[in-house]
Every structure is written in C-alpha cells, then in structure tokens.
C-alpha cells in the first residue's frame, strides 16, 4: 500500500510554474530521498505534502485520504527542517511538547510523550536546558524529537543536516536511518547531497527544474541512469 501518493501535482507561484506534473508513490515504511539542484522544487514539493503550501493542481494522498484541503495540523505527518526552527526561549521539554500543547493534549500525555521521545534520542539530561546550551547534533535531535512526539506515520525531512559539520552529518545519517527503522515510519528526505542520497535511500527521486527525471534504487540509478542529467548529477561530487 502507498503511504503517500503524489499525483500529477503542479505548483504555480503567480505566473511562475515551479512544479510540473509530478508523480511519486511512496510505499509504507519506505525511505525515499528527493535529490536535485538548488531551486528545482524539492522544498516546495515537501511543503505541499505537509500542507504548508497549497497545491495548484493534482492530488496528494496520505494513507487513504486526499489531503489537498486538509489543514497541516490534521495531516498524519511530521516535518524536520534544516534550520531546526527551535523556539530559543523555551526549554527543550517545551520545544518538544509544543505541538501537542497546540493540539490540546493533557499535561500527563505531553509529559509521557516527551519523555519517551527524549529517551529514544538520548535527550533526557537536556530537557530543562534551552536550545543555545545544546550542540548542533543535540539540537537536530530535538528537532526530530518534536516530530517524534506526534506519533506521525510519515516523516518529512528538508535538508536536516546541511548546517552540521561533515563528521556529524555522517553520524546523524545513521541515527536518522536507525530511527526510521525502529519506528517503522515512512520517510521522505530532501537533500542536494548525492552521497547522502546514495547511502540513505531505499529509492531516490531525481528532480530537475520542477520535474521528476528518474526514480529508482540507488544502485539502479547509478548503473542505469536514464539520461545525462541523472548520470551527471549522481556522478558529480557534492
Ligand atoms: P529547492 O528546495 O529544490 O532548492 P524550492 O522548492 O525552494 O527549491 O524552489 C523552487 C522554485 O520555486 C524556485 O525557483 C524558487 O525561487 C521558487 N519559489 C519557492 N517558494 C516561492 C514563493 N513562496 N514564491 C515564489 N517563488 C517561490
Ligand atoms: Mg529547499
């Protein structure tokens, strides 16, 4: 069964069409990586799945529900951003529990969920600190924790590691993959880093100028690129 179906989706900003008839079917528990050069529409596509941008044409289905007109709060997704977007003056506990508070969950439930997520992400000792007192890797874990408390079936990642140094990026790749496997979630992960895509993806979606060039398993794409763009993009160092 498909966890997320993107069907003939288009996006126009004013008169500028930035997404052209995109079709992607993400299976349950799959880790799909969207790659492509800067400006090709990766974030826009992810934001449409999350409900942070409207869809100009086509359909997005999450589970069995067409979500075109569903409020982001009511979609079964959680999103992790590149810049963490943590609230600087809230404790780590409050940062992680905030989305549940917005959804009017009880204090007891928030406490349980946050503690559970903090345990999984090794953040228990940091819950009373503020974001500025944490390292880059720890802040990235808090960003994941905020997604985790939601119990969402689908995780969306928009270049979550691009602000981290090279060594930490490698560690966090492994952590994110381990989390995906442990929670049995479905993940859609955006990056412009070919190595990240090759090492993390079950399948890679190569995008260019608002279109999908090719979809396939990493080795499949590497061995049999469908066109020069795909060959050039996957073959060149980031
Ligand atoms: P990527 O994430 O692949 O770098 P984006 O999805 O951010 O690409 O952008 C795709 C295209 O859409 C770019 O040309 C960008 O300038 C344009 N774009 C993105 N957001 C907006 C917006 N809110 N208004 C107008 N144009 C936008
Ligand atoms: Mg982007």
Image: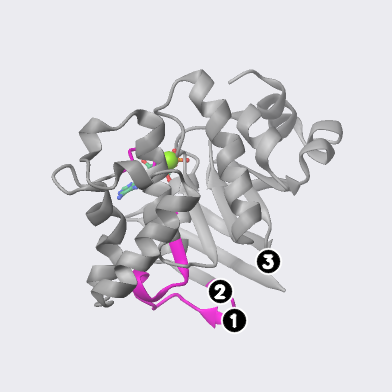
Label 3 sits on residue:
28
Q: Inspect this view and state whether residue 174 appears.
A: yes
Q: Position of residue 171 (x, y in %)?
A: 56, 29
Q: Does 182 appear above or below 205? A: below
Of the pair 201 and 56, the residue shown nearer to us: 201
Residue 92 located left or right of residue 6: left
Q: Quarter for ligand 1? A: top left
Q: Earlier in the sequence, mark 2 or mark 3?
A: 3
Residue 100 located left or right of residue 212: left
Q: Residue furthest left?
A: 89
For the point 80% across and 32% down, the residue is 222
- In this picture the colour scheme is one colour
> Could you classify mark 1 by the number of other residues whose Cα lies within 10 Å: few (under 14), some (14-19), or many (20 or more)?
few
Label 1 sits on residue:
64
For the point 40% across and 62% down, the residue is 149
Q: Which mark is residue 61?
A: 2
Secondary structure of the residue carrying numbered label 2: strand
> Could you classify mark 3 by the number of other residues whose Cα lies within 10 Å: few (under 14), some (14-19), or many (20 or more)?
some
Task: Read off the magenta span.
Answer: 60-84
Q: Is residue 158 magenta?
A: no
Query: Are discs 1 and 2 less than 8 Å apart at CB?
Result: yes
Q: Which mark is residue 8?
A: none
Q: Is residue 82 magenta?
A: yes
Q: Position of residue 90 (x, y in %)?
A: 17, 49
Of the pair 158 and 181, the residue shown nearer to us: 181
- Measure the C-alpha gap from mark 1 to mark 2: 6 Å
Q: Does 193 appear above or below 46? A: above
Q: Inspect this view and state whether residue 36 appears.
A: no
């Amino acid at each position: 069964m498909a966890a997320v179906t993107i069907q003939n989706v288009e996006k126009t900003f004013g008169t500028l069409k930035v997404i052209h008839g995109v079709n992607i079917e993400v299976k349950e528990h799959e880790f799909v990586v969207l790659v492509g050069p800067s400006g090709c529409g990766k974030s826009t596509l992810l934001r449409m799945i999350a409900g942070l941008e409207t869809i100009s044409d086509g359909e997005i289905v999450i589970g069995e529900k067409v979500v075109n007109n569903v409020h982001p709060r009511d979609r079964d997704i959680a999103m992790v951003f590149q810049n963490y977007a943590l609230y600087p003056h809230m404790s780590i506990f409050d940062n992680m529990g905030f989305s549940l508070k917005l959804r009017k969950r009880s204090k007891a439930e928030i406490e349980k969920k946050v503690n559970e997520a903090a345990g999984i992400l090794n953040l228990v000792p940091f819950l009373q600190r503020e974001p500025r007192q944490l390292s880059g890797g720890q802040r990235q874990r808090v960003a994941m924790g905020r997604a985790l408390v939601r119990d969402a079936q689908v995780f969306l990642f928009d270049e979550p590691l691009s602000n981290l140094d090279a060594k930490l990026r490698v560690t966090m790749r492994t952590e994110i993959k381990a989390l995906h496997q442990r929670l049995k979630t479905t993940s859609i992960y955006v990056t412009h880093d070919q190595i990240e895509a090759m090492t993390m993806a079950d399948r890679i979606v190569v995008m260019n100028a608002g279109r999908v060039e090719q979809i396939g398993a990493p080795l499949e794409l590497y061995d049999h690129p469908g066109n020069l763009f795909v060959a050039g993009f996957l073959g060149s160092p980031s």
